[in-house]
């Protein structure tokens, strides 16, 4: 019995250690550079947000599985829960459901961000940039 408990405790310790290292560097500050909507009838244009302002900056936290709007001020603090987080070759793929819409997000190691929102009869494609939070590195050629 004692050996079984020891094995369980060791397995949990390994999982906690692995989770801690998997979470490092998995938070990004993202900016939105462009957005387009395509309706089922072929209409292409800006996404229809009603009377709400278009998000311009967001924080993506893979460990918490959350996308939080940072700007504009009128939308600051809105959170979309993400259900899946997957990493393949440095590219992070995250997805969730918000108000009956599918939200999918891809962040590449090079800092590109692509977000899609899919609802009945409409697809929004959003493009921007992602910077790992806490990254104070400077472009090559500059000293710190």
Image (cartoon, rainbow, N blue to C red):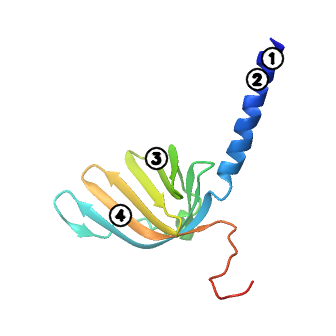
Q: Secondary structure at mark 2?
A: helix
Which residue in the structure is indicated by mark 2? Answer: 7
Disc 4 vs disc 3: Cβ atoms closer than 8 Å?
Answer: no
Q: Earlier in the sequence, mark 4 or mark 1?
A: 1
Point out which mark residue 125 bears: 4
Q: Earlier in the sequence, mark 3 or mark 1?
A: 1
Left or right relative to 41: residue 132: right
| Residue 22 spot, x, y in % from top left | 65, 49
**How crowded is the residue under tag 2: few (<14 C-alpha within 10 Å), some, or many (20+)?**
few
Disc 1 vs disc 2: Cβ atoms closer than 8 Å?
Answer: yes
Task: Note whether 58 is above or below 19 in the view shown.
Answer: below
Res 132 quadrant in image: bottom right
| Residue 58 spot, x, y in % from top left | 55, 64
The alpha-carbon separation of the residues under discs 2 and 3 comes to: 35 Å
Point out which mark residue 3 bears: 1
Task: Note whether 50 is above or below 118 in the view shown.
Answer: below
The alpha-carbon separation of the residues under discs 4 and 3 comes to: 15 Å
Q: Nearer the viewer, mark 2 or mark 3?
A: 2
Q: Earlier in the sequence, mark 2 or mark 3?
A: 2
Look at 65% across and 88% down and name the residue there: 141
Task: Work out whether residue 89 or residue 144 is closer to the camera in this orientation and state it.
Answer: 89
Look at 42% across and 53% down and name the residue there: 104
**How crowded is the residue under tag 4: few (<14 C-alpha within 10 Å), some, or many (20+)?**
some
Can you say which quadrant of the picture contains the N terminus?
A: top right
The alpha-carbon separation of the residues under discs 4 and 2 comes to: 48 Å
Left or right relative to 27: residue 13: right
Q: Is residue 82 visible?
A: no
| Residue 70 spot, x, y in % from top left | 58, 66
Point out which mark residue 96 bears: 3
Q: Nearer the viewer, mark 4 or mark 1?
A: 1
């Amino acid at each position: 019995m004692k050996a079984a408990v020891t094995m369980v405790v060791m397995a949990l310790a390994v999982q906690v250690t692995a989770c801690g290292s998997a979470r490092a560097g998995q938070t990004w500050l993202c900016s939105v550079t462009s957005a387009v909507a395509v309706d089922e009838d072929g209409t292409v244009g800006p996404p229809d947000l009603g009377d709400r302002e278009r998000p311009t900056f967001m924080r993506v936290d893979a460990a918490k599985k959350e996308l939080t709007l940072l700007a504009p001020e009128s939308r600051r603090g809105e959170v979309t829960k993400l259900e899946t987080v997957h990493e393949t070759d440095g590219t992070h793929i995250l997805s969730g459901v918000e108000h009956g819409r599918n939200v999918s997000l891809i962040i590449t190691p090079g800092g590109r961000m692509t977000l899609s929102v899919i609802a009945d009869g409409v697809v929004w494609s959003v493009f921007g940039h992602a910077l790992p939070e806490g990254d104070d590195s400077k472009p090559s050629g500059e000293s710190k």
